[in-house]
Image (spheres, rainbow, N blue to C red):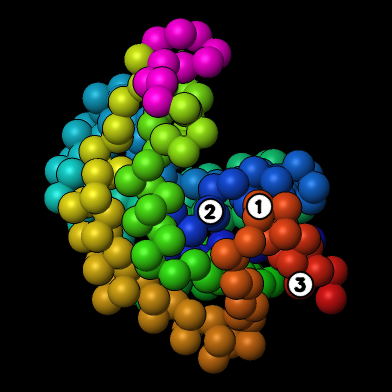
Amino acid sequence: MHNVILLGAPGAGKGTQAALLKDKLNVPTISTGDILRRNIKEGTPLGIEAKKYIDAGALVPDEVVVGLVKARLASDDCKDGFILDGFPRTVPQAEALDKIADIDVAINVDVPFELIVSRLSGRRVCICGETYHVSMLNGSNMCAKCGKELFIRDDDKTETIKKRLQVYSVETAPLIKYYEAQGKLKNIVATGTVEETFKDIMKVLND
């Protein structure tokens, strides 16, 4: 069984690695970010409430997020393991998680903040779900898949990114010490390619 947590600042590449791990380990990836964005898009009461915090670059309250995760981990597809991406974000959330599930390893995807700002501020997305970086668009602002115009998500704007990183430093970075104290932390320096980072993560999981 692999009950894995992916830690790291916003934009460190956790989502990309989570998707690769999902296919390799054949266990579900649970992203609170995706769950929240879906609720925001659908205009649910939870989504409307969460959007207020996300737009301000702040964290969504624990009781909302913990409830979502607890319900998700109770699903049948999690019985052989799971990958948590974006949760826990705070030590109190980690303590709540310890009461819900046994975590095998917490992998910290470590990327310098300057590189994260460069990555995220250059990200462009399409309504169809495709994601691009300006460095790969050759001056175009159109989706190669559906031909529609690309846009910048609010949380990819430079000011919001810097605010999110400040919040991370204060509220989320202490998780590194939390899991280190439990002997479950593995640190991966993720400044290389996606493939190199994935290889390093798999090495940790197979040790």
Q: Is residue 146 magenta?
A: yes
Residue 191 can be seen, yes or no: yes
Q: Is residue 87 magenta?
A: no
Q: Main secondary structure of the magenta part?
A: loop
Query: Residue 200: where, in percent of width, then height?
Result: 74, 67
Q: Pick out the residue farthest to the bottom.
A: 181
Position of residue 4 relative to residue 151, above or below, is below
| Disc marking residue 194 | 1
Q: Upstream in the sequence, badge 1 or badge 2?
A: 2
Q: Quadrant of residue 180?
A: bottom right
Kindly identify the amino acid type of the residue bearing the numbered disc 2.
Answer: Gly
Kindly identify the amino acid type of the residue bearing the numbered disc 1.
Answer: Val
Q: Could you say which is closer to the camera, residue 118 or residue 36?
A: 118
Kindly identify the amino acid type of the residue bearing the numbered disc 3.
Answer: Val
Residue at image location 44% in from the left, 77% down from the top: 175
The reply, left or right, for residue 157 in relation to residue 86 is left
Q: Quadrant of residue 127?
A: top left
Say what secondary structure mark 3 lies in: helix
Q: Which quadrant of the figure contains the N terminus?
A: bottom right
Q: CA distance from mark 3 to mark 1?
A: 16 Å
Disc 2 designates what residue?
13
Tell whether label 2 touches label 1 (CB within 8 Å).
Answer: yes
- For the residue carrying disc 3, how many other residues have a C-alpha within 10 Å: few (<14), some (14-19), or many (20+)? some
Q: CA distance from mark 1 to mark 2?
A: 8 Å
Query: Residue 50: where, in percent of width, then height?
Result: 23, 43
- For the residue carrying disc 2, how many other residues have a C-alpha within 10 Å: few (<14), some (14-19), or many (20+)? many
Q: Specify the segment rendered in magenta.
A: 139-148
Disc 3 designates what residue?
204
Position of residue 138 relative to residue 57, above or below, is above
The reply, left or right, for residue 101 in relation to residue 96 is right
Q: Could you say which is closer to the camera, residue 28 or residue 146?
A: 146
Q: Which quadrant of the figure contains the C terminus?
A: bottom right
